[in-house]
Image (spheres, rainbow, N blue to C red):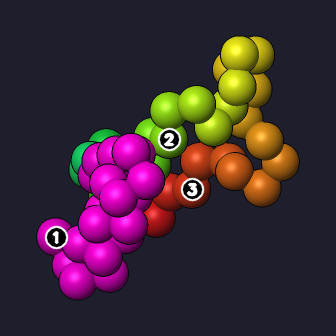
Amino acid sequence: MGLGLSIARGIAEAHGARVTATNREGGGARFVVDMPGLAGASGAVPDGMREATA
C-alpha cells in the first residue's frame, strides 16, 4: 500500500470508517471508503460522494 493510501486509511479509521483496495479485472484498482452512518437511513449516497476508480 502506498503512503497516500496509508494516510487515507488512518484518517478513515480515526472516524470509524474503513478503506479497502482491490485489483480490477483488466487492470487498475478499486478503492472503497466505507463510512457507516454517512448515507443515513435511506442508503442513498450524497452528491459528491460517489465511488471513484483508478
Mark earlier in primary sequence (1, 2): 1
Q: Are marks 2 and 3 in contact (CB under 8 Å)?
A: no
Q: What is the x, y in percent for residue 30? A: 39, 51
Mark earlier in primary sequence (2, 3): 2
User: In this figure, which residue is indicated by the disc labeled 3?
Assistant: 52
Mark 2, Cα crowd under 10 Å, few <14 / some 14-19 / many 20+, is some
Residue 41 location, quadrant: top right
At x 69%, y 51%, the residue is 49
Mark earlier in primary sequence (1, 3): 1
At x 23%, y 83%, the residue is 3
Q: Residue furthest left?
A: 1
Give, as a single range, the part of the protein colored magenta.
1-21
Q: What is the x, y in percent for residue 46? A: 78, 41
- Camera-nearest residue between 22 and 17: 17
- Provide the secondary structure element on which disc 2 rests: loop
As drawn, the label of residue 35 is: 2
Three-letter code, disc 2: Met
Residue 4 location, quadrant: bottom left
At x 76%, y 16%, the residue is 42
Q: Is residue 32 visible?
A: no
Q: Is residue 13 visible?
A: yes
Q: Are marks 1 and 3 in contact (CB under 8 Å)?
A: no
Q: Residue furthest top?
A: 41
